[in-house]
Amino acid sequence: MKVKPSSNAFQLYNTYYDLLYQDKDYLKEGQYVYSLIREFSPGARSIVELGSGTGNYSAVFSDLGFKVTGIEKSQPMIDVANAKGIRDFHSLQGDIAEFNVEENFDIATSLFHVISYLTENQQVLSCFRQVSKHLNAGGLFIFDVWYTPAVYSQVPETRYKAVENEEVHITRIARPKINFDANTVDLEYRLILQHKSNNAYEAMEEFHCMRHFSTPEIKMFAELAGLTLLRSEEFLTAKQPGSNTWGVCYILQKNA
Ligand SMILES: C[S@@+](CC[C@H](N)C(=O)[O-])C[C@H]1O[C@@H](n2cnc3c(N)ncnc32)[C@H](O)[C@@H]1O
């Protein structure tokens, strides 16, 4: 098998993002987040979505009647989102640790572990402060992150995933390495693409460094940013977080 290394790996990964996550139930997850919004802030109408990616949650929130503003670092992801023609949605290119827009919002969300991409304390604090600054009084910040007790009790292992559409077959291998002193995990992704039209193979690699959080850390960042922790629970099931809970959802509220 002859494999051609990709020269623009990051763009390629973005191109196939929706295919790689075709099994993710964005509708169910978006409705779960909506149930939290209804519980804590029933009159909310606007959302700033941090790390909006290809707009899959944005589309659900838009269908639920929200005006959605995305903040997203990757222009190729924004291009994919824009091509979906989502009503009442626009995405701005920017870093969620430094974003600044001339608008306030009822709700801030950051879903599918986007906050875990902020590996340095300063980035997390700066992001929380910008969220607080952009929220209306009583506004909510809802996000899910990797949870420290689960990372250390379950220990991440090498994972394989295969997906395909009519054009391409993709095999993805994800190899993790824990950095005990940094509360992070390096994820090395290796993707092998088989293009069906000419049977050519292509390989690409991508590295993601993911931070995991404990509840006292989230509380500390929240308090420093003028936010209060209302609740933490397992994302989607609403169970109490434990050593098996990889993704924990935090609901913070802007102080009055
Ligand atoms: C796992 S994807 C999730 C995308 C989207 N929330 C979803 O669930 O489909 C992570 C996204 O966060 C974006 N991202 C990571 N760090 C970021 C940062 N510092 N500022 C803005 N976007 C960031 C990435 O470009 C990517 O689109």
Image (cartoon, rainbow, N blue to C red):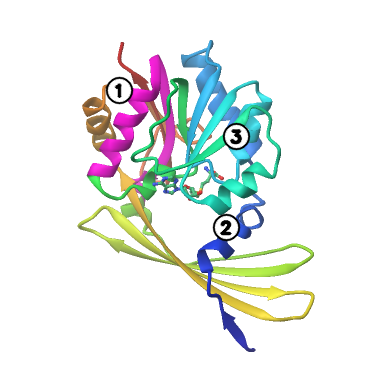
Q: Is residue 230 visible?
A: no
Q: Is mark 2 within 8 Å of ligand 1?
A: yes
- Residue placed at 38% from the left, 55% from the top? 154
Q: For residue 53, what is the image quadrant?
A: top right
Q: Which residues are the magenta region?
A: 122-150
Residue drawn 60% across and 41% down?
55
Q: Nearer the viewer, residue 195 or 98?
A: 98
The reply to whether discs 2 and 3 touch (Cβ–Cβ < 8 Å) is no
CB-based contact (under 8 Å), mark 2 and mark 1? no
Q: Which mark is residue 227?
A: 1
Q: Quadrant of the N terminus?
A: bottom right
Q: Which residue is mark 3?
A: 58
Specify the amino acid type for callout 3.
Answer: Ser
Q: Can you name the residue that lies furthest to the front here?
A: 102
Q: Nearer the viewer, residue 21 or 245?
A: 21
> Residue 108 appears at what percent x and percent y?
45, 28
Q: Earlier in the sequence, mark 1 or mark 3?
A: 3
Residue 223 higher or lower than 165, as above or below:
above
Residue at label 2? 14
